[in-house]
Amino acid sequence: MKRPTQIDVARLAGVSRATVSYVVNGLTEGPISITEETRQRVLHAINELGYQPDAMAQSLRSGTTNTIGLLIPDMHNPHYWQIASGVEQEAQSEGYDLLLISTSLDPDRELHSVRSLSRRRIDGLILVLTYENQVNDEIEQLVQRRKPLVMMNAGIGNVDGIDVVATSFQKGATQLMEYLLSLGHRCIGLIYGVAHDQMGWDRLTAYQAALQKASLPTEDNLIEYCGTTLEEGYQAAGRLLDRSPRVTALVVINDLLAIGALRAIAERGLRVPEDISIASFDDIALASYVNPPLTTVRMDAEELGRTSARLVFSRLVNPKLAPQNVHITGQLVIRSSTGPAPNH
Amino acid sequence: MKRPTQIDVARLAGVSRATVSYVVNGLTEGPISITEETRQRVLHAINELGYQPDAMAQSLRSGTTNTIGLLIPDMHNPHYWQIASGVEQEAQSEGYDLLLISTSLDPDRELHSVRSLSRRRIDGLILVLTYENQVNDEIEQLVQRRKPLVMMNAGIGNVDGIDVVATSFQKGATQLMEYLLSLGHRCIGLIYGVAHDQMGWDRLTAYQAALQKASLPTEDNLIEYCGTTLEEGYQAAGRLLDRSPRVTALVVINDLLAIGALRAIAERGLRVPEDISIASFDDIALASYVNPPLTTVRMDAEELGRTSARLVFSRLVNPKLAPQNVHITGQLVIRSSTGPAPNH
DNA sequence: GCTTCACATTTAAATGATTAGATCAAAAAC
DNA sequence: GTTTTTGATCTAATCATTTAAATGTGAAGC
């Protein structure tokens, strides 16, 4: 059975399509007026047929889709989920739907997806990119078409004239390092699990700067590189723990990998924080529920999502707004996964 | 700057709109033929203007949106994320985009969202509902319009004639209970954290049946009801643990809440599994990384998502397919969070 | 009695694509 | 030399809506 259109309703009610449109959109007051009797006839016909206006046709006419797009790098990391959750909340409360695309950390897909979203006449777009430079042309176009566009990144090269929600763990990472050093830790490992070199730079540089400032060696043998999954975090922690001298503290690029690392620690019979301290970044919901609760640098990802969405909507309301540049920094949250260095 | 349309391209290339369409869609072979020279002129104009076909207009014409919708109850539970992830993967590989809606466990929103998705001419729809009965009318309509529609549920009342991916923990829960009883546990608590009475029924009944079969009391004082968040699982576990006599094993409705429960256990200085065993359902990625790794009944949620998506696409290809009814059951995975009952 | 006006509704253009069928010139067939 | 065919392109209908402008009617104004 085909879905009924305005024409079907008009025919059944014995009126023209315009009248149906006016009734549906409640324009019966003001310049246009429809008799109550006609109105009822139309409403009755709508009910009879189960008519619903076709969103595609409306979109074509209005140039508006009531949809915002969100591009995230990976659906397996709770951090990105939380961002999406925040965006979804805000979108829903504004009556917008969410088109979600994950690029699975693939730069080709990133480019392809931005193109696809732009063809769809999305009303606004939030990008959490990993390979920014790839899509500059597309972004340029979107900006010129006055599409609300928010880029969320970890302080990579910002594009001019667009809204940015920049996140930085730099300050929080520095705080964390000072805290660990004050606990007497002198051999602090870093698990650097990222999809791409440019990611996590804020944490890496803060880590190195802190060590340097404390006149400690910053050689690479304290850094273990890996991918972005739990399993890879677990593996990397294992490799790092089996080196000697063993680190007394472990800084992990995010909570997810830290949970993987916790397992590696537990398997070696080490106690946290008595034998080894561990700290990470993000403060995902789980961070305070694992055993022991993780010391972490908090960045409320859901709030990040909500903020980005709000930027989109504020530009949707007022397209002439000057480019916004929200800067969000992480805050150190001390829990029980960190403690004094052994023999200190 | 407005986005260029087919007309702009046609004008610049000195041809008609039809010709542009043919070139864009690569129909230059077969019944239609275009000289290479014209083709080049059109392509050049497209490039010049940065023309991209408007997806809305295409959708209106074709009645097809290249989009599938997914409705999930809650974005905070990793279980649903994993489903979404599976759907997204499959959709992307078929060249479809994903429209994601979370109802936040609100029945009104559930109804409203299904309506909204149906207005959008979504090509297919996957519903993970919690309040099925509310939307039966809408579903009926979608079926009559021959929209591929998959319902994923935990074996509640199935609607006739539609594709269903039914999940059941019944068998796995029974296995789990037998396993716990065989370890000597006689006082087994249940943390029943659901949004809605009908959810988790499979686990509850299996739990009760197993106790009854073992001639153990099935009074309600071993069951702690709560909501669906980590925090609520934590609280509920606390309440249950503080009763006496204390349970020697804890069955939790899902892994997420079990992780909350683990914290409550740790805070009371109890060891897992020496003092108390804990087991749950889902086997989210984290389940094998927490300390200790959780015994759980595995249900691969990502696979669930992929399966649902595949059902949608298979019906999209062949609308006359008989209604599919995939039944997926959970499998017990024994890890180290369960062990012999104390004093056994 | 003629104009003016308000009211209730309709007509038709516009949104941006696809595609069946029309057109028109040049080449091929007879 | 006329008809047929073929190749290349164009015309116009269609998809389902919105909305500015037009239409027709009866009542009010003078």
Image (cartoon, coloured by chain):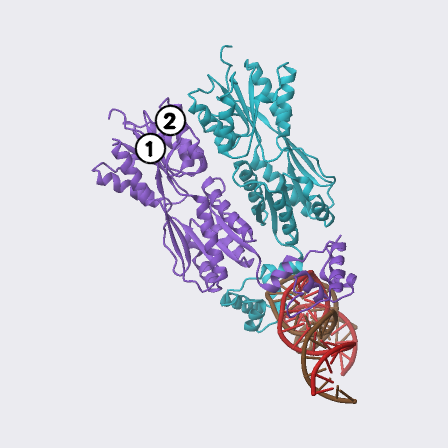
Chain colours: A purple, B cyan, C brown, D red
Front-lying residue, D11 or A163: A163
Front-lying residue, A204 or A81: A81
Across and down, in percent, residue A338 comes to: 33, 31
Q: In the visual, does A178 lie left or right of B39? A: left
Q: Write down the chain letter for disc 2.
A: A
Question: Which residue does the image show at 41% across and 36% down from the upper left?
Answer: A255
Q: Which residue is mark 1?
A: A250
Q: Which residue is mark 2?
A: A265
Across and down, in percent, residue A105 comes to: 46, 45
Question: Which residue does the image show at 46% across and 48% down from the upper left?
Answer: A305
**Quadrant in which the C terminus of chain A appears:** top left
Front-lying residue, C8 or B100: C8
Q: Amino acid at mark 2?
A: Ile
Residue B294 visible in image: no
Q: Secondary structure at mark 1?
A: strand
Q: Write down the chain letter for disc 1.
A: A
Query: Which comes sooner in the sequence, label 2 or label 1?
Result: 1
Q: Amino acid at mark 1?
A: Leu
- Find out whether the residues at labels 2 and 1 contact each other: C-beta distance under 8 Å: yes
